[in-house]
């Protein structure tokens, strides 16, 4: 057997072991990724000290960036939640769009809220609004719920500073500015089709009603409560969009002002994710916290609470960095890169297919993104890809990790429980919605790729 064949078998064996540990043994993804990374190192003949170095370098290089960004984003989002900013955004958009266009208001609300707030948290906060609209109109829950979920899912998958695209961008070296730009360009059409359009279609076929065990669920703040307690819509929108604007401005500053302009250096500093998110988080602490009557101790409590779910995401992402580093240091990466590069598939489509395969088999979008990013990193090096195309590869991986959510995905059961759907009905609604988002997202990425 040739050395290249041995390396390929080691890589395939590692991927199969990862899926077995996560699916059959229910081992946490963090531990599973570390175990598989060590196994790949041993199977490829690496020396023990080299394996330990790869683990250290992979974890450190990844978390040096991801831990900071995810941690800041989590605190920022939690402050937006506890201050009533989510309620203000939802009520304001519904008021401006009107009841007749409430589907579009909910889709846009989900799109904006999921920028700083985790999808499942945002959904649980906003689902009482879906219940209230369904009671008032007599329509199926899906008429309002699907647009909200589509907005949440698109931003959660495509637009930093949500953890998925942040992790993938770091692992393959993509510029976050391009990821944000392409995430919006690919995500908005996906949100429109999978949200209001598909929501209207599926609501006519599945008459979902509020389940009995959720009937006592309260609504979001009333208009009067929002006026008394919640911060202004303009303030909330400004804080949410500030880091995105700074990051994108940093990306395009060279085109706007010329690479030699001193302004480019300052925009590069302000537009770095560390600085942009730090500014937004400090603004949230001050304008949504202490300026609105919270004590410093209460603000600190909110920030500490926000880091609990962020910690899991950070560790899993770090373990994904270890997996990627082990593929590279063991030599598997070069072999896989050459093999996949010879497949004649466009890198964007290849990234989508890899992420889709892992997503369908084991369910976790995070694991699918990280695994696909680790496998695509050598391909990117082999093909010498750089610049905007890497942003499109991130979107392709995110698209693949979104499609075909089914019974092995926690999101499937969250939607099923809150909307009182059977498994068959959830497949027809939630699964189709997720698949529409992923397929439209990758098609848009391929289309944009023709012009760059």
Image (cartoon, helix red, strand yellow):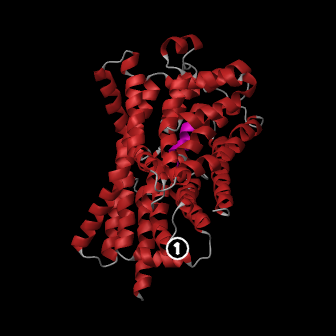
Instruction: Confirm whether the magenta stretch covers residue 212.
Output: no
The image quadrant that residue 40 belongs to is bottom left
The image quadrant that residue 32 belongs to is bottom left
Q: Of residues 254 and 180, which is closer to you in this image?
A: 254
Q: Is residue 147 above or below residue 23?
A: above
- Would you say 161 lies left or right of 294 here? right
- From the top left corner, tell me how far across and down residue 381 is, in percent: 46, 71
- From the top left corner, tell me how far across and down residue 323 is, in percent: 38, 63
The image quadrant that residue 44 belongs to is bottom left
- Would you say 120 lies left or right of 189 here? left
Q: Of residues 354 and 159, which is closer to you in this image?
A: 159
Furthest residue toward bottom: 1
Furthest residue toward front: 261
Chain part drawn in magenta: 409-415
- Quick one: label 1, few (<14), some, or many (20+) residues within 10 Å? few
Q: Residue at x 31, y 27 (%)?
A: 301
Instruction: Confirm whether the magenta stretch covers residue 410.
Output: yes
Viewer can see residue 325: yes
- Placement of the C terminus among the 4 image quadrants: bottom right
- Placement of the N terminus among the 4 image quadrants: bottom left
Q: Of residues 246 and 370, which is closer to you in this image?
A: 246
Instruction: Say what secondary structure mark 1 lies in.
Output: helix
Q: Is residue 115 above or below residue 356?
A: above
Q: Residue at x 59, y 34 (%)?
A: 110
Q: Of residues 289 and 251, which is closer to you in this image?
A: 251
The main secondary structure of the magenta stretch is helix
Q: Residue at x 57, y 38 (%)?
A: 152
- From the top left corner, tell me how far across and down residue 180 is, in percent: 54, 48
Q: Residue at x 49, y 62 (%)?
A: 372
Q: Is residue 341 above or below residue 138?
A: below
Q: Which residue is mark 1?
A: 383
- From the top left corner, tell me how far across and down residue 325 is, in percent: 36, 66
């Amino acid at each position: 057997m040739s050395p290249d064949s041995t390396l390929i078998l080691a890589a395939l064996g590692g991927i199969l072991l990862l899926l077995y540990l996560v699916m059959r043994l229910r081992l946490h993804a963090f531990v599973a990724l570390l175990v598989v990374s060590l196994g790949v190192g041993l199977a490829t003949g690496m020396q023990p000290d080299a394996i330990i170095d790869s683990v250290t370098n992979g974890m450190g290089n990844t978390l040096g960036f991801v831990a900071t960004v995810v941690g800041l984003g989590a605190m920022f989002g939690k402050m937006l939640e506890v201050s009533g900013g989510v309620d203000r955004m939802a009520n304001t958009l519904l008021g401006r769009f009107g009841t007749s266009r409430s589907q579009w208001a909910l889709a846009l609300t989900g799109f904006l809220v999921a920028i700083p707030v985790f999808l499942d948290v945002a959904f649980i906060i906003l689902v009482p609004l879906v219940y209230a609209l369904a009671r008032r109109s007599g329509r199926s829950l899906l008429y309002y719920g699907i647009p909200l979920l589509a907005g949440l899912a698109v931003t959660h998958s495509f637009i930093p500073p949500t953890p998925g695209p942040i992790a993938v961008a770091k692992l393959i070296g993509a510029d976050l500015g391009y990821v944000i730009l392409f995430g919006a360009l690919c995500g908005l059409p996906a949100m429109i089709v999978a949200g209001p359009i598909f929501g209207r279609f599926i609501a006519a076929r599945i008459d979902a009603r509020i389940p009995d065990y959720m009937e006592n669920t309260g609504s979001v703040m009333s208009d009067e409560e929002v006026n008394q307690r919640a911060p202004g819509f303009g303030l909330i929108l400004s804080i949410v969009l500030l880091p995105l604007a700074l990051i994108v401005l940093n990306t395009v500053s060279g085109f706007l002002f010329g690479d030699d302009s001193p302004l480019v250096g300052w925009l590069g500093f302000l537009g770095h994710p560390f600085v942009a998110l730090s500014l937004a988080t400090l603004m949230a602490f001050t304008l949504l916290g202490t300026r609105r009557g919270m004590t410093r101790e209460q603000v600190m409590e909110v920030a500490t609470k926000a880091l609990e779910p962020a910690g899991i995401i950070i560790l899993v992402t770090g373990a994904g960095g270890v997996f990627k580093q082990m593929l590279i240091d063991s030599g598997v990466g070069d072999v896989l890169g050459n093999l996949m590069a010879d497949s004649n598939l466009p890198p964007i489509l290849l990234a989508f297919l890899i992420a889709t395969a892992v997503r369908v088999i084991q369910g976790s979008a995070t694991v699918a993104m990280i695994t696909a990013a680790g496998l695509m990193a050598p391909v990117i090096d082999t093909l010498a890809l750089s610049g905007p195309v890497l942003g499109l590869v991130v979107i392709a991986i995110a698209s693949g990790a979104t499609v075909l959510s089914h019974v092995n995905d926690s999101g499937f059961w969250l939607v099923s429980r809150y909307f009182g759907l059977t498994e068959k009905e959830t497949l027809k609604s939630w699964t189709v919605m997720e698949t529409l988002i992923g397929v439209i997202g990758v098609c848009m990425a391929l289309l944009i790729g023709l012009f760059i």
